Image: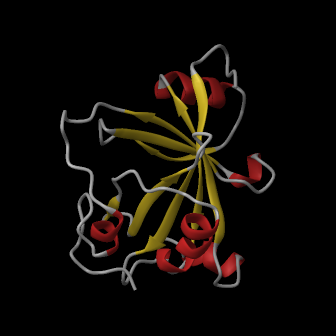
Amino acid sequence: MDLDGLDMSFDHTAVAAPRIRDLLPIYHDLLGGRHLGGGGDQRVAGYRTLQLTYANGGKVELMEPLAGSTFFDSFFELTRGRGGVHHLNFHVGDLRAAVAALTERGYRLHGLNRSDVRWQEVFLHPKEAHGVLIQLAQPGPREPGEPRPTLEEVLAGRGRNGNGIPSP
């Protein structure tokens, strides 16, 4: 994809449900997604996430709300409580330039977050993208040899920034 010549590439599709465990029979067992390690909790926002990868390199991110979180409330209301595709993620090499280019073109953006050098992001509003939430993210550096939790550890609440509470 080309946004004024910016380095941009599709990375993954995110699927949210009330329970990640309900998504695993399809995305892991049936479709053969492999968890390569990693995932955890976004405590401030209120969700847990992990990614599966497929033979061709494609990725699906699975998401669920943390106990007491309202993060997905409006999304689950729209999907009658079942969940579904939550967003598409594109990686950009320069988030500031991407925000400037989109703003200059008149697009409405929300959720700009530059607080974590490991992951800076902004969202293109679904009304701008025919009902699809598009996340533009600039991944940052990772620590060499950083531990990557197993699928079981993430589901047990012991992933990155885990709250220690198992997934339902």
Residue 127's place in the image compared with 49, above or below, is above
Pinpoint residue 95: horizontal percent, then vertical percent: 48, 28
Residue 90's place in the image compared with 95, above or below, is below
Residue 143's place in the image compared with 45, above or below, is above
Q: Is residue 79 left or right of residue 34?
A: right
Residue at 31% across, 42% down: 115
Residue extending farthest to the top is 5
Residue at 70% across, 84% down: 80
Residue at 59% across, 18% down: 6
Residue at 37% across, 40% down: 119
Pinpoint residue 166: horizontal percent, then vertical percent: 30, 81
Q: Is residue 113 left or right of residue 125?
A: left
Pinpoint residue 147: horizontal percent, then vertical percent: 20, 48
Q: Nearer the viewer, residue 35 or 113?
A: 35
Query: Which quarter of the rendered picture does the C terminus lie within?
Result: bottom left
Residue 32, located in which quarter of the rendered image?
A: bottom right
Pinpoint residue 41: horizontal percent, then vertical percent: 32, 64
Count the numbered circles shown: 0
Question: Which scheme is used to colour this image of the protein?
Answer: secondary structure
